[in-house]
Image: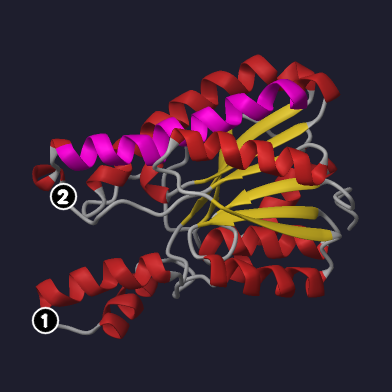
Amino acid sequence: MDLGLKGKRALVMGGAKGLGRSIADALAAEGAVLTISGRDVAAMEKAAGELKALGAQGVMTVAADVSSSAEMDKLADAAVKAMGGVDILVLNHGGPPVCTASEMTEENLVKWFQNIVVSPIRITMKLMPAMRAQKFGRVIVVGSSGMHHPIPTLALSNTLRASIWAWLKTLSAEVAADGVTMNILAPGSIRTDRITQTAAVRAEKAGTSVDAEIARAGKEVPIGRVGEPGEYGPMGAFLAGTTGAYITGTMVRVDGGRVRSML
């Protein structure tokens, strides 16, 4: 299937590792031009070579920290300068500390509000006018199943990601007629550094091992296992392509059936 992505210009935040990398891989295989950002320069340089080998028409790396609004502006400007514009924006960042709702602190709430809410909105609004003017744009948020079904040990993430979900749902309706779609791609238990971190917390409390906790997480999924990153990214490419033109303002779950809600 031709997704119509050859030559499309994509900015993938956190594109060197994990779920961001999974989407970058899928876009590269379709012949997109990529800019990937992150804090680990060595990891980005390694990823750039691998993405070119997959078929990306070009790959640029930009060091940027989502805790800084100024760096979001710098990232947007660098991507536009390098690629001539941005057609596809993938909003992705590291997750906040594991905690219950009772353990949340004001300090962490304020700190992670910047990372999870302010910075993604800031860079989107900087790039959105050009997307609307050219009558094409795709914004994909790397979300969490906790946005739909709160995860007890990820209360901080649940709380702040709900804000992004409400913002996206509101803005998507405002820009849809201009050919811009906005969607959340929500993973379930996907084998990334994040799932290892949360499994380590559970293992310490339960007196088990990380592998045992990951296996237990897999048993909670109807498919019977945790997912692999390569099973997540292709849906991002589908949403980014011409195939996603009539899908907007929604949350697409790649979770092995874990969330049982019908809504």
- Pick whichever, 216 or 99, lies toward us: 99
| Main secondary structure of the magenta stretch | helix
Q: Could you give the CA–CA distance between mark 2 and mark 1, rounded to whole angstroms?
A: 19 Å
Per the image, label 2 sits on a secondary structure element best described as loop
Q: Is residue 180 magenta?
A: no
Measuring from the top left, give residue 157's x and y in whole percent: 31, 45
* Residue at horizontal 15 percent and vertical 50 percent from the top: 100
Measuring from the top left, give residue 247's x and y in whole percent: 70, 34
Question: For the magenta stretch, what is the residue range?
Answer: 107-131
Does 76 sit above or below residue 10? above
Q: Is residue 57 left or right of residue 209?
A: right
Task: Answer with the quarter of the image where residue 20 lies.
Answer: bottom right
- Pick whichever, 30 or 87, lies toward us: 87
Q: Which residue is mark 2?
A: 100
Badge 2 or badge 1: first in the primary sequence: 2
Q: Is residue 136 left or right of residue 39?
A: right
The label number, if any, that marks residue 207 in the structure image: 1
Q: Is residue 263 visible?
A: yes
Q: Amino acid at mark 1?
A: Gly
Q: Is residue 127 magenta?
A: yes
Q: Is residue 148 visible?
A: no
* Residue at horizontal 64 percent and vertical 74 percent from the top: 46
Task: Answer with the quarter of the image where residue 155 lies.
Answer: top left
Does 199 sit above or below residue 148? below
Question: Which image quarter is the N terminus in?
Answer: bottom right
Q: Amino acid at mark 2?
A: Thr
Q: Which class describes the residues within 10 Å of circle 1: few (<14), some (14-19), or many (20+)?
A: few
